Amino acid sequence: MKLLDRQGNIAADDNGQDKLLDKLYNTSIGRVLTSMLIRPSVSKLCGRILDTKFSTIIVPKFCKANNVDLSLYEKQTFDSYNDFFTRKIRVEERPVNPDANVLISPSDGKVSVYKIHENGHFLIKHTEYTLEQLLQDKKLAKRDLDGHIYVIRLTVDDYHRYCYAADGRKSEQRKIAGILHTVNPVANDVCPIYKMNSREYCLIKTERFGTLLQMEVGALMVGKISNNQQGLGFVHKGVEKGRFEFGGSTIILLTQKNVVIPDRDLLEHTGSGMETLVKMGEQIGRSANRLDA
């Protein structure tokens, strides 16, 4: 799948990982193997292995293959591969847009923005979903009818910590059990991953963006979603919310009708079937009801 930067330039195309996942999901042998890999127990076992000191042997090759510059991070030596994978970036490398009317991306990743129709249905690539399937809550699903859904897909080369997208009053975390398909688009063509995968979310009641819903979705080989604050409380834009352990994963933001205006480039790129590269802290939308207008 093609990726564009914020200026509309092609940043990347299909890579080796995409080709491998295509074989896993679109061949008979691959589907048998996938049926075993998506089990949470397998991810937990892999997680234990990647918590060992021995697993650091992978780090140099990974950095070379994915052009990871460790000088951007707070430390350069690690106790395990998972310690490396959840490494913390220097604050100055992910500046947060300070404009109170700006909705920021809560993570690095590849973003797509879709319209949620009045009946609560939306399409991600060629697969139809409903808010009720995503949230497992019929009453809550009505809140975002005719709004937008941001899907921010992280791959193994991305920074895997994430922050709050806006200031506001946070609800408790709600967890939905599930399995762990990859979040690569190739899987979405075969399996309805956003109603099958393990995920958790909270609501953030904001002054300028209505009530946002921020969700973390686990994925193939991601054994753990670690959120820092489980309970109620006021949270601030750009403050770390949590992290994913090894593997790809996804952040989802749901916005209500006529409250947030998604950035035009993100809508146009999505409409052309392409994702856009974003960094944590940068603008992805603006308040539709500016208080200082």
Image (cartoon, rainbow, N blue to C red):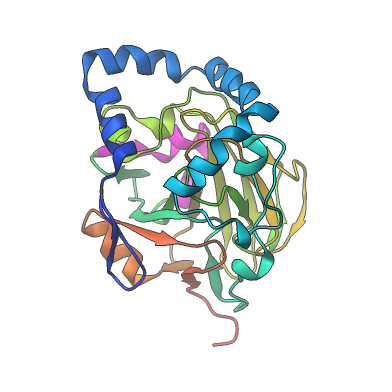
Q: Which corner quadrant of the image does residue 48 belong to?
A: top right
Asked whether 152 or 215 is in front, the reply is 152
Residue 124: x percent and y percent?
A: 31, 44
- Prevalent SS, magenta region: helix
Give the percent coordinates (x, y) of residue 287.
Answer: 51, 73
Residue 142, given in percent of the width and then of the height, sits at 47, 45
Q: Residue at x 51, y 47 (%)?
A: 63
Residue 87 as seen in the image, left or right of residue 40: right
Magenta residues (range): 127-144
Give above or below for 25 relative to 282.
above
**How far across and how far down the image is residue 249, in percent?**
49, 40
Instruction: Determine whether, in the image, residue 81 is placed left or right of residue 217.
Output: right
Q: Residue at x 64, y 63 (%)?
A: 206
In the rendered view, would you say 29 is above or below 143? above
Q: Nearer the viewer, residue 211 or 93?
A: 93
* Residue 224 can be seen, yes or no: no
**Residue 117 is covered by the magenta coloring:** no
Front one among 108 and 189? 108
Residue drawn where x is 69% and y is 55% of the image = 240
With 271 as the anchor, is 220 left or right in this view?
right
Please state, as top left, top right, bottom left or bottom right, where the C terminus lies in the image.
bottom right
Q: Is residue 222 visible?
A: yes
